[in-house]
């Protein structure tokens, strides 16, 4: 375990007397980069020097420890193993800290936050993912604001308990449920949205929590799952999709699950070859999970003939889940549940706030 990181202790004004302690886990991404004048490229900067970039960190009235992965990653290089490692670190340090802030690349942050939300069930403490569009070493960086606000939110308490006891993404001015968020911008600072679920908090002059939408403290035991299934894929349909493409992709050796990205409210072609390819895969035991290509709204497989057919052959409706939360949910359930009926049932309903209660059975 210790191979994964080095520790940086930040001396805050709170000293040893603080009643709140936060663990920051730096995994990589733009947030930890600096501009190298010689090579004229962005390169990871030595995170032990974080105080030079964000001297404000010493002014917090809570204890702060930063763990840095030995080899920080561009999040484009993340695999499911990295998700398990982050979850394991939080699990290992769970009783030592009151909250966790994960510094992460923005590109796959929504996948990681979703995966960690499934791997750490009934978490009673805040886990706030954040990152930035500009490196922390640049003058106009959004990293400082994002990092500082994420720390404040992580430390926040309501009636003596963590204000947000769940896995979230904080970015720009929004705190979003991690498994509801999507990266929607590659240029502007407003990089994340959660079209189907209201923000859990909005940070302006004050940080206003949207208490009605925050996960209540769970009374069930905290549990860490360490398995994820990788034999899955996302299949985005498009007009004129070809039979040989479908057959090849759905006929892949070892395939266990597919997130099918359909149109609008969950529609897809009714051509016999299309339905037959999906049906064959389902009969071989592949689970197919229907999510929409639209950012907002939901899949309802009973509205159109073009979606009803999918329901008939056993495609499962993902309702208003995001593709990121859907693929990670499939990977989580396929690895941790052995009974296909249980997996199918759990895909239809929320397990940790990742989708709304379904309208259809
Ligand atoms: N490619 C970077 C990453 O996801 C982008 C970022 O952090 O904004 O690691």
Image (cartoon, grey):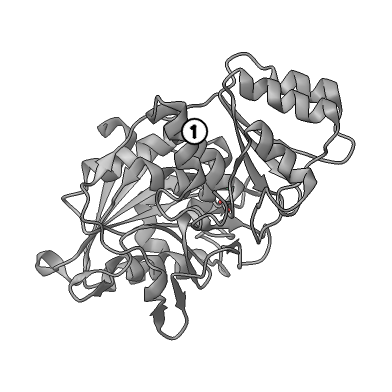
| Residue 290 percent coordinates (x, y) | 64, 42
Quadrant hosting residue 56: bottom left
In the image, 197 versus 70, the foreground residue is 197
Q: Tell me the quarter of the image containing the N terminus.
A: top left
Q: Residue furthest right?
A: 240
Name the residue at 18% across, 65% down: 20
In the image, 106 versus 287, the foreground residue is 287
Other-residue count near label 1 (Cα within 10 Å), few / some / many at <14 / 14–19 / ≥20: many
Q: Residue furthest left?
A: 17
In the image, 72 versus 23, the foreground residue is 23
Name the residue at 28% across, 52% down: 123
Secondary structure under tag 1 reads helix
Residue position marked by numbered label 1 in the rendering: 331
Residue 248 shown left or right of residue 190 in the figure: right
Name the residue at 61% across, 52% down: 37
| Residue 214 percent coordinates (x, y) | 38, 67
């Amino acid at each position: 375990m210790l191979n994964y990181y080095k520790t940086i202790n930040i001396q805050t004004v709170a000293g040893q007397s603080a009643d709140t302690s936060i663990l920051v886990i730096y995994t990589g991404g733009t947030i930890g980069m600096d501009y190298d004048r010689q090579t004229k490229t962005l390169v990871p900067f030595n995170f032990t020097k974080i105080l030079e970039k964000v001297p404000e960190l010493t002014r917090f009235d809570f204890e702060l420890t930063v763990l840095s992965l030995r080899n920080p990653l561009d999040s484009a290089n993340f695999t499911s193993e990295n998700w398990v490692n982050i979850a394991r670190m939080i699990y290992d340090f769970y009783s030592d800290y009151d909250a966790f802030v994960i510094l992460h690349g923005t590109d796959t942050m929504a996948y990681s936050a979703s995966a960690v939300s499934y791997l750490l069930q009934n978490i009673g403490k805040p886990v706030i993912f954040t990152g930035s569009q500009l490196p922390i070493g640049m003058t106009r960086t959004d990293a400082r604001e994002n990092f500082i606000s994420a720390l404040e939110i992580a430390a926040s308490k309501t009636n003596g308990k963590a204000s947000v006891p769940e896995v979230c993404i904080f970015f720009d001015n929004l705190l979003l449920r991690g498994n509801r968020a999507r990266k929607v911008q590659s240029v502007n600072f407003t990089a994340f949205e959660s079209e189907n679920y209201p923000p859990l908090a909005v940070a302006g002059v004050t940080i206003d929590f949207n208490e009605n939408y925050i996960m209540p403290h769970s009374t069930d035991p905290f549990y860490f799952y360490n398995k994820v299934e990788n034999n899955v894929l996302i299949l985005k349909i498009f007009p004129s999709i070809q039979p040989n493409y479908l057959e090849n992709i759905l006929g892949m050796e070892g395939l266990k699950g597919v997130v099918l990205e359909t149109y609008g409210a969950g529609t897809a072609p009714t051509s016999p070859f299309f339905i037959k390819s999906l049906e064959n895969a389902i009969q071989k035991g592949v689970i197919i999970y229907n999510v929409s290509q639209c950012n907002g709204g939901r899949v309802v497989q009973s509205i159109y003939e073009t979606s009803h057919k999918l329901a008939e052959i056993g495609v499962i409706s993902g309702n208003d889940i995001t593709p990121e939360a859907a693929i990670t949910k499939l990977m989580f359930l396929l690895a941790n549940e052995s009974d296909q009926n249980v997996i199918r049932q759990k895909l239809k309903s929320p397990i940790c706030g990742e989708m709304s209660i379904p309208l259809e059975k």
